[in-house]
Image (spheres, grey):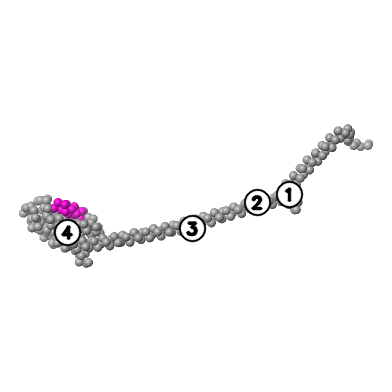
Amino acid sequence: MKRLLTSVLLLAAVMSVSAESKGSTTRHERNFIVEGNKLYKEERYAEAEVAYRKALQENAMNEIAQFNLAASLLRQGSASGETQQEAMRILQNLTRDAENISIAENAFYNLGNIAFNSQDYAKSIELYKNSLRRNPDNDKARENLRLAQKRLEEQQNQSDDDKKQDQNKDQEKDKENQQNQNQNQNQNQDQNQDNKDKQDQQQQQNQDKQQQQQQPQNGGISKQNAEKILKAMENEENATRQRINAEKKKNGAPSRRPVTNPW
């Protein structure tokens, strides 16, 4: 595993002028590329970049100068830096347009390493396969392909575990919400029952008070009933008096004179 990890971190080596399969190069182009390769091996990548750019000024279509420039940029750039972005654009163009099969193979391989180090294992797998299609004997691409497949499987398993954990968390949360909802319902029912008991108690107190007002005080009749009885007696007495007066008038009895004093 350690050997494979080391392999993943390696870029394809810069290519010499002799690797050019098609087209001719000028003496200045070749000299700049040779100079750049010497600086690259000495790990003087910024100076190597300058030399490769000079070669491209002589011939912008030089595929070896393009590939070696991309390699020197990758050695200098960070994962999200401008130098790496430029290197990736150069390599992508070479995978599409390079006439030299070896350059296309190594461009795919380096792009596969970039994707692998960005943990985009699915993309790196496809790039390594494209490198192997152009050179089935590329052992580094084959080793990195197997490692990328293993990492992708681990990544997918981890993703499944995370999903299960999220589902369990959601279920626990739903269960907690249901318990809280049931508790709130029980509290509301208890509150409603308390309110009903208070209302019933108040209503009973009002009825008891009303009955007490209607009951006779000190064992007698109530004030209201006494007033009704007195009123009925007055009406009956008036009716009797009117009847007696009417009979006297009918029989011709003299009306009663008021009594006067004898003196």
Q: Which mark is residue 212?
A: none
Task: Find out whether residue 92 is within the magenta segment.
Answer: yes
Provide the residue designation for mark 2. Answer: 207
Magenta residues, start to end: 84-98
> Is 100 situated left or right of 120 in this image?
left
Quadrant in the picture for residue 247: top right
Please give the label number shown on residue 222.
1
Q: Is the magenta stretch mostly helix, strand or loop?
A: helix
Q: What residue type is labelled 2?
A: Gln
Quadrant location, the C terminus: top right
**Helix, strand or loop at disc 4?**
helix
Task: Calculate the distance from the C-alpha at mark 1 to the C-alpha at mark 3.
Answer: 53 Å
Pointer 4 residue: 132
Residue drawn at x 62%, y 51% as measured from the top left: 203
Alpha carbons under labels 4 and 2: distance apart: 99 Å
Q: Mark 1: give few (<14), some (14-19) or many (20+) Cα within 10 Å.
A: some
Q: Position of residue 153 (x, y in %)?
A: 27, 61
Tag 3: Cα neighbours inside 10 Å, few (<14), some, or many (≥20)?
A: few
- Horizontally, residue 251 falls left or right of residue 185, namely right
Q: What element carries label 1?
A: loop
Q: Where is residue 235 in the image (x, y as percent from the top left)?
A: 78, 40
Give the alpha-carbon distance from disc 3 to disc 4, as whole Å. Answer: 64 Å
Q: Is residue 132 above or below residue 256?
A: below
Q: Do the residues labelled 1 and 2 touch (CB within 8 Å)?
A: no
Query: Which quarter shows the N terminus?
Result: bottom left
